[in-house]
Image (cartoon, rainbow, N blue to C red):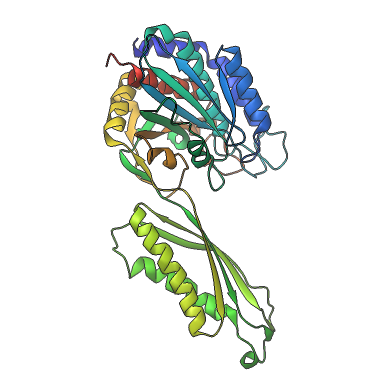
Amino acid sequence: MNAAEVKLLAEKYFEEVRSYRRYLHMHPELSFQEHATAAYVQQQLTALGLEVRPGIAGTGLTAMVKGRGDSKQTIALRADMDALPIHETNDVPYRSVNEGVMHACGHDAHTACLLGAAHILQETRDQWSGNIQLIFQPGEEKLPGGASKMIAEGVLKNPPVQAIFGQHVYTPFEVGTVAFCPGKMMASTDELYITVKGKGGHGAYPGATLDPVPVAAQIITALQLLVSRFHSPIEPIVLTIGKVIAEGATNIIPDQVYMEGTLRTFNESLRKTLQEEIYRTCTGIAKALRVEAEVDIRVGYPCLHNDETLTHRAIVRAKDYLGAENVLLAEPRMGAEDFAFYSHEVPACFYRLGTGNPAKGIDAFIHTPQFNIDEDALKIGMGLLAWNAIREADTAL
């Protein structure tokens, strides 16, 4: 097979795949609640003659496309299916009909592209060898992440997967382009929940209280020192406290202050060290100032690491498929993605699919009520997934 044949098939199935995307966009479901989405995906896969394994991690499902021969080489392709608790403001015919729920992160496009790739792979299965595992994953947006659950239930085993590919829509890059990042691509993410407990009272008589507010302020400042003064300035670290609740008043000192935040790094060893330091800092300051701090660090997704060798092969294939001028290098970002779990199990390649088109007014960032994509990107998304899988699975390489 060659890239031109795959591109023709992507064009052939474009209208059908666009209809998948629009249906999914209209009927979004939140993390681990993707029951109707999974049923819809299963219906499409079954219509292609594929055997589907449903109910993985609750609402996840897989299907296998088998090439010619009896090769044991198995490559996986992954798409996430969940939406976000966002009220859509786009005025489009396929606007969400589920109030307060929206595909604002493009998982509808990811799922549609993988269904499109399934069409291409099934039609061409006598032209390549090996096996291609299609993974439709729930719960990317919510800890502990659907990827970790699907891995625990064996999606990378029986047969064992040799490599996995995934993609993510990205409006800052224009439609027609893709971007790769060999090595560290996305940060780990942990959630911080901190409660400083004191003794409230009248604001005019602070000596009769144990005021948690200035203690919380000192904790926030001290946490920033962990980043700026206790670790190397060339090691990327984000430690953000994004929510602070102290329900007092002008003349009321509250009993407690509640805080939430996030910790992100590219270094798993440093990540563990920082978790310990955050706990010690919060409890130590609180104890010194005669109050109490409860610290709950919910360990989230690890750093996403793209296998350098696999990613460089994917870059060469993308240049063959799209032209070198349309293949970009992406910088590492402090955002997180549960595809990272796969990258710690098998060689992985996760790349950005350009979906922006400022001329059409399609430039809103992900996780916003105005998010949308240029649907021409679906052709590239399904075709490149299929092309990478075919070339990687084909034992003739």
| Left or right placement of residue 113 versus residue 234 in this view | right
Residue found at the far front of this picture: 158
Find residue 120 and report its horizontal and vertical position in percent: 47, 13
Query: On screen, 308 above or below 72?
Result: below
Find residue 139 and report its horizontal and vertical position in percent: 57, 40
Whether residue 27 can be seen here: no
Q: How many marks on residues?
A: 0
- Quadrant for the C terminus in the image: top left
Query: On screen, 6 above or below 95?
Result: above
The foreground one among 88 and 76 is 76
The foreground one among 283 and 372 is 283
Task: Please tell me which residue is depicted at 28% across the width and 13% down the height of the picture.
Answer: 396
Tell me which corner region of the image, top left, top right, bottom left or bottom right, holds residue 92.
top right
| Left or right placement of residue 377 versus residue 314 in this view | right
Residue found at the far top of this picture: 126
Find residue 2 and report its horizontal and vertical position in percent: 34, 11
Whether residue 287 can be seen here: yes
Tell me which corner region of the image, top left, top right, bottom left or bottom right, holds residue 389.
top left
- Quadrant for the N terminus in the image: top left
Task: Please tell me which residue is depicted at 39% across the width and 59% down the height of the picture.
Answer: 272
The foreground one among 288 and 261 is 288
Query: On screen, 120 above or below 388?
Result: above
Find residue 274 and report its horizontal and vertical position in percent: 39, 63
Query: On screen, 141 above or below 202?
Result: above
Task: Please tell me which residue is depicted at 64% across the width and 29% down the height of the picture.
Answer: 37
| Left or right placement of residue 201 versus residue 180 in this view | right
